[in-house]
Amino acid sequence: MIIGCMFCLGVVAQAVETLATRELEDIARVEALLEREWNALPESDRVRRAEGIVKDYAQFLKKNPNSVEGNILAGKFCRRVNCDAQAVDYFQAANRLSPGLPVVCQQLGNYCAESMHPAEALSYFLTAAQNDPTQGVYAYQVAETLLSYRDFFITKNFYTAAAFDAAMAEYFERAVLLEPRNRIYALRQAESVFYQQVPNWPKARVQWEALLGYATTQLEKEYASLQLAHITYEIGDLMATRLYLNTVQSPQLAEGKYTLMAALDSRDPLVAGAVNLKNL
């Protein structure tokens, strides 16, 4: 008799789960339809239909409060329609139900970063990166958070300057290794050298030379050349510095170019000697 009752309970539970899955799929289909039609709709229809989907998710989760997937989908939709407070509630609920899910930690980290809470954002991104080390985006978000809030993390004693440089370099390296074709990751990794206490200039030179080779627009080429001019100046290869600077013509980069040219002229012994002769 007991076995029969247990079997009945299992069947009922399975039926409830199947019904919930179908209901969630129905909401997702309505959401996908709205996304396809979004650009063609007047604002009033967008708002009305979006509010309807938000209500559908709320009703679903009232009946199925332990649905991790439901909370994640509801949170993502609320973020898309700028209902951030509701979105965070859903993601926090999902995190309580299944702690450490990378996709949930990423969403909570994004919200914290946007809300200017870098320590909380970093904590969530680190958890996501540790729990799924195969995805470059999680490693990149750790590195980008460190880069964006460098002064905060060092002045608040989260890291020493040396430890900070090592952590940022490690996570940028991971992101680029996992997604070698992602040019944003490679660019930000290369830019990060200028924020390190003890930059590895030779390594940075290799990275920027690669970016120069991959550049597809004139501005991208000149930007990479300007950074290479900075790096070769630091290394002491002043001839290369001048050659790179001569290729920079864009007005957007003029200030950086002429600042470096002035520093170069004061350091270059031939130029400095010529200036001294004029003053005799």
Image (spheres, helix red, strand yellow):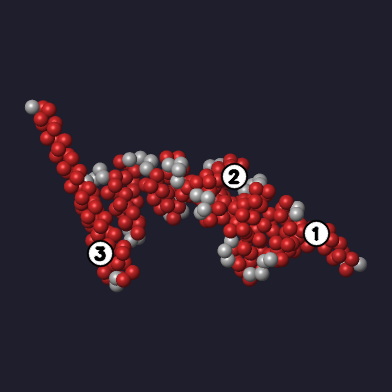
Location of the N terminus (image quadrant): top left
Q: Position of residue 4 (x, y in %)?
A: 10, 30
Label of residue 268 in the image: 1
> Could you tell me which secondary element the residue under label 2 belongs to?
helix
Number of numbered discs present?
3
Counting residues from the N terminus, which is met first, the one under dot 2 or under dot 3? 3
As shown in the figure, which amino acid type bears the numbered disc 2? Asp
Q: Residue at 26% across / 69% down in the picture?
A: 45
Q: Residue at 31% across / 67% down in the picture?
A: 38
Q: Residue at 73% across / 51% down in the picture?
A: 235
**Distance in Å between CA atoms under marks 2 and 3:** 47 Å
Q: Position of residue 109 (x, y in %)?
A: 42, 49
Location of the C terminus (image quadrant): bottom right
Counting residues from the N terminus, which is met first, the one under dot 1 or under dot 3? 3
As shown in the figure, which amino acid type bears the numbered disc 1? Asp
Check if mark 2's residue and mark 1's residue have beta carbons within 8 Å.
no
Q: Which residue is mark 3?
A: 49
As shown in the figure, which amino acid type bears the numbered disc 3? Arg
Counting residues from the N terminus, which is met first, the one under dot 2 or under dot 1? 2
Q: Which residue is mark 2?
A: 165
Q: Residue at 86% across / 62% down in the picture?
A: 273
> Could you tell me which secondary element the residue under label 3 belongs to?
helix
- The image quadrant of residue 127 is top left
Q: In this rendering, does residue 2 appear at all?
A: yes
Q: Position of residue 279 (x, y in %)?
A: 88, 68
Q: Nearer the viewer, residue 118 or 265?
A: 265
Q: Position of residue 22 (x, y in %)?
A: 20, 50
Check if mark 1's residue and mark 3's residue have beta carbons within 8 Å.
no
- The image quadrant of residue 55 is bottom left
